[in-house]
Image (tube, rainbow, N blue to C red):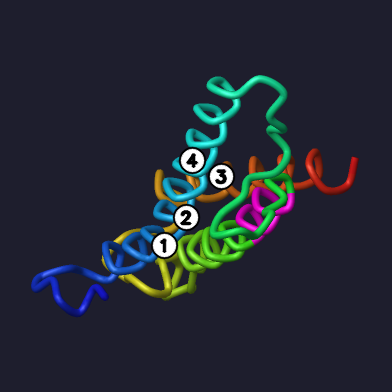
Amino acid sequence: LWCFFDGMNAKQKILFNLLTPVMIILYVAAIHLAIIVRTARKRGASSSFIVIKGRKINVAKLYSQSLLLMIGGVVGVLFKLMDCQRVGDQWFHFHFGFEQCFASTWILSFLSLLTIIALFSLFFVV
């Protein structure tokens, strides 16, 4: 998709890959909002299932599958942002060599990865 935008550097192209998980978050949030509105209007309505075109959809399963799909895309981008290569006595990012490694991009990616690992452990392991 990023090929439609002219003038993007390699770092911006990698960050653009985060668009898919963001769109999934928005889609699941819209479904969650629909569930909240539906359960607020109807007494006795279950908030664990939603019926779309006659099919019952388990909301918890939808959330867990969406989360797994998002985590895969985000972790792939984070690993690309943390990938470093040694050039002489300095370290540079492998995919975009104009920026030195272990600076703000690398630290933010590393902290984001640790946060995702902690949240994943909280939701799926505990």
* Badge 1: residue crowd in 10 Å (few <14, some 14–19, many ≥20): some
For residue 65, what is the image quadrant?
bottom right
Locate residue 60 relative to residue 1 in the image: left or right: right
Q: Is residue 114 left or right of residue 108?
A: right
Badge 4 vs badge 2, beta-carbon distance below 8 Å: no
- The quarter in which the C terminus is drawn is top right
Q: Is residue 69 above or below residue 123?
A: below
Assess disc 3: are there few (<14), some (14-19) or many (≥20) residues with their C-alpha within 10 Å of its C-alpha: some
- Sequence-wise, the earlier of marks 2 and 3 is 2
User: Residue 40: x, y in percent?
Assistant: 56, 20
Return the residue nearer the eye: 33 or 110. Answer: 33
Main SS of the magenta segment? helix
Numbered mark located on residue 29 in the image = 4
Q: Label 1 to label 3, Cα distance in Å?
A: 17 Å
Q: How far, Cα to Cα, is label 1 from label 4?
A: 14 Å
For disc 1, the marked residue is 20
Q: Is residue 66 left or right of residue 3?
A: right
Residue at 10 percent across and 70 percent down: it is: 7
Mark 3 or mark 1, which is nearer the start of the sequence? 1
Residue 117: percent from the left, percent from the top?
Answer: 71, 48
Q: Earlier in the sequence, mark 4 or mark 3?
A: 4
In percent of the image, x 78 and y 42: which residue is there? 123
Location of mark 2 (residue): 24
Q: Residue at x 45, y 68 (%)?
A: 89
Query: What is the three-letter code of the residue carrying label 4?
Result: Ala
Disc 3: which residue? 112
Evaluate if marks 1 and 4 touch, with contact meaning CB atoms under 8 Å apart. Answer: no
Q: Is residue 89 magenta?
A: no
Magenta-colored span: 61-68
Label 4 secondary element: helix
**Quadrant in the picture for the N terminus:** bottom left
